[in-house]
Image (cartoon, grey):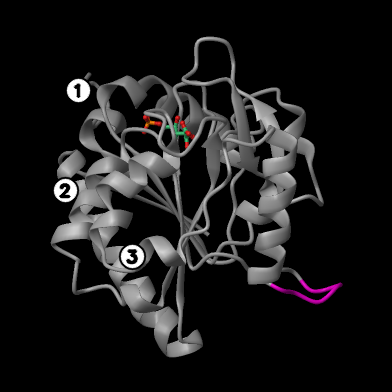
């Protein structure tokens, strides 16, 4: 199932995402006694992480929350381009004990090594029996690049066709912040219960329009348009990315 919501601005989008995370956490606690969330990198989620660390400091069951990542740039965790480093600064270090329940992708290792270690850990955390579809995170956060990439699944990448391994070494196009990456693959991403795709800013307006047009024809060109979930894939846009009603831009 795919849903879409448009918010007046990026801050309203962050607050809506935080509320959805709070609700998913409550449901997960009742059902399974723990809450699992996979974070994304990039700029868009940084405000959400700050909202979670402040306004939701007591509204999420952090003591039972386990944090994962959808992708990582191949740099050490204290590097300014590290997704883990960004999340640690904005959220993880601000909630007592949360870093100890965070499983980061080891960007300081050779990418293939970091990917296989992360995949092994995920299989231990989210065990499933052969022949039944796996389920991973209660909430998966993803972003959208201006080329339609998500996590570190870029258009044209061989990683898009992976059907069994849950994490792979991959390459971002030249010019991206750090080209060597580790990314989760569709088998792991699509196994999330609920996925929130955060998309804000006028810089995303063109790709949003292209993805909407492509979705009418299955959206194969754009990695982000291929994401599914066990439950709902919920797109959260701000008005700048949405482009407003026809004729407004
Ligand atoms: C990364 C990502 C990536 C990101 C998008 C959107 O490591 O760069 O996880 O997929 O989510 O590029 O990034 P912005 O939020 O900065 O636009």
Query: Element type at marker 1?
Result: loop
| Horizontal side of residue 97 vs 149, given as left or right | left
Q: Nearer the viewer, mark 3 or mark 2?
A: 3
Label 3 crowding class (10 Å Cα cut-off): few <14, some 14-19, many 20+? many
Q: CA distance from mark 3 to mark 2?
A: 14 Å
Q: Position of residue 3 (x, y in %)?
A: 42, 54
- Which segment did they paint magenta? 127-132
Q: Position of residue 90 (x, y in %)?
A: 26, 47
Query: Element type at marker 3?
Result: helix
Residue 242 magenta-highlighted? no
Q: CA distance from mark 3 to mark 1?
A: 32 Å
Label 3 with label 2: CB-CB less than 8 Å: no
At x 52%, y 21%, the residue is: 178
Q: Which residue is mark 3?
A: 21
Q: Nearer the viewer, mark 3 or mark 1?
A: 3
The answer to whether any part of residue 201 appears in the image is yes
Q: Position of residue 8 (x, y in %)?
A: 15, 41
Whichever of labels 3 and 2 marks the residue nearer the N terminus, that label is 2
Query: Element type at marker 2?
Result: helix
Residue toward you, 157 or 96: 96
Whichever of labels 2 and 1 marks the residue nearer the N terminus, that label is 2
Ligand 1 is in which quadrant of the figure?
A: top left
Q: Which residue is mark 2?
A: 12
At x 16%, y 44%, the residue is: 11
| Horizontal side of residue 38 vs 205, given as left or right | right
Label 2 with label 1: CB-CB less than 8 Å: no
Q: Which residue is mark 1?
A: 248
| Horizontal side of residue 114 vs 144, given as left or right | right
The answer to whether any part of residue 151 appears in the image is no
At x 54%, y 47%, the residue is: 70
């Amino acid at each position: 199932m795919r849903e879409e919501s448009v918010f007046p601005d990026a801050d309203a989008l962050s607050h809506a995402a935080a509320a959805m995370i709070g609700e998913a956490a409550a449901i997960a606690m009742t059902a399974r006694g723990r809450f699992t969330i996979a974070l994304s990198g990039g700029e868009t989620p940084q405000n959400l992480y700050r909202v979670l660390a402040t306004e939701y400091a007591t509204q999420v069951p952090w003591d039972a929350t386990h944090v994962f990542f959808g992708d990582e740039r191949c740099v050490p965790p204290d590097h300014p381009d590290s997704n883990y480093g960004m999340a640690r600064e904005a959220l993880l270090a601000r909630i007592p004990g949360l870093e100890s329940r965070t499983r980061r992708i080891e960007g300081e290792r050779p990418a293939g090594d970091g990917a296989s270690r992360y995949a092994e850990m995920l299989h231990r955390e989210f065990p499933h029996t052969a022949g039944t579809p796996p389920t991973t995170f209660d909430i998966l956060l993803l972003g959208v690049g201006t080329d339609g990439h998500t996590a570190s699944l870029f258009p044209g990448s061989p990683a898009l066709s992976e059907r069994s391994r849950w994490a792979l070494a991959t390459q971002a196009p030249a010019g991206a912040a750090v080209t060597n990456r580790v990314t989760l693959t569709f088998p792991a991403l699509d196994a999330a219960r609920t996925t929130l795709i955060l998309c804000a800013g006028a810089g995303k307006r063109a790709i949003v329009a292209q993805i909407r047009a492509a979705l009418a024809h299955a959206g194969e060109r754009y990695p982000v348009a291929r994401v599914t979930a066990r439950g709902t894939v919920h797109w959260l846009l701000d008005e700048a990315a949405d482009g407003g009603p026809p004729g407004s831009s």
